Amino acid sequence: MEGIKDTVLNVIKTLDAKRGGEAGPGPEDVLKKVLTKKELGHIKINYFKKGVVYVNVDSSSWLYQMNLHKEALLSRVKKDSSAVKDIRFSIGDIK
């Protein structure tokens, strides 16, 4: 299944670039760059819609931790990707 997901994401990025959209790094790439390895082990980027990145976390304690650092994280992400307006965290499956 991961192969299909990667293929669909690549097609969407290609179509967006042809349409004149932002050709820079996607929200997933930017988040992976600014988060630590420990944080990346407890989250999964669910989807990106209308400037909002939806992220699943694996426990309530990590939800609290990520919400504490949300503003600092959001400012670092906005420096690299102007498409991101907000980040929303929720408890969910990270597999």
Image: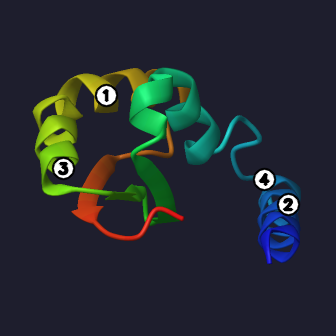
- Residue linked to disc 1: 73
- What is the spatial separation of the Cα atoms under label 2 and label 3, in whole angstroms? 29 Å
Residue type at tag 3: Leu
Q: Answer yes or no: is residue 30 visible.
A: yes
- Residue linked to disc 2: 10
User: Is residue 2 or residue 8 the one in the foreground?
Assistant: 2
Q: Residues within 10 Å of mark 3 (few under 14, many from 20)?
A: some
Residue type at tag 1: Leu
Looking at the image, tell me whether mark 3 or mark 1 is earlier in sequence order.
3
Image location (x, y in percent) of residue 71: 19, 30
Report the residue at 77% width, 41% height from top: 23
Q: Secondary structure at mark 4?
A: loop
Report the residue at 31% width, 32% height from top: 74
- What is the spatial separation of the Cα atoms under label 4 and label 2, in whole angstroms? 15 Å
Tell me: 22 left or right of 95: right
Tell me: 70 left or right of 13: left
Looking at the image, tell me whether mark 4 or mark 1 is earlier in sequence order.
4
- What is the spatial separation of the Cα atoms under label 3 and label 1, in whole angstroms? 14 Å
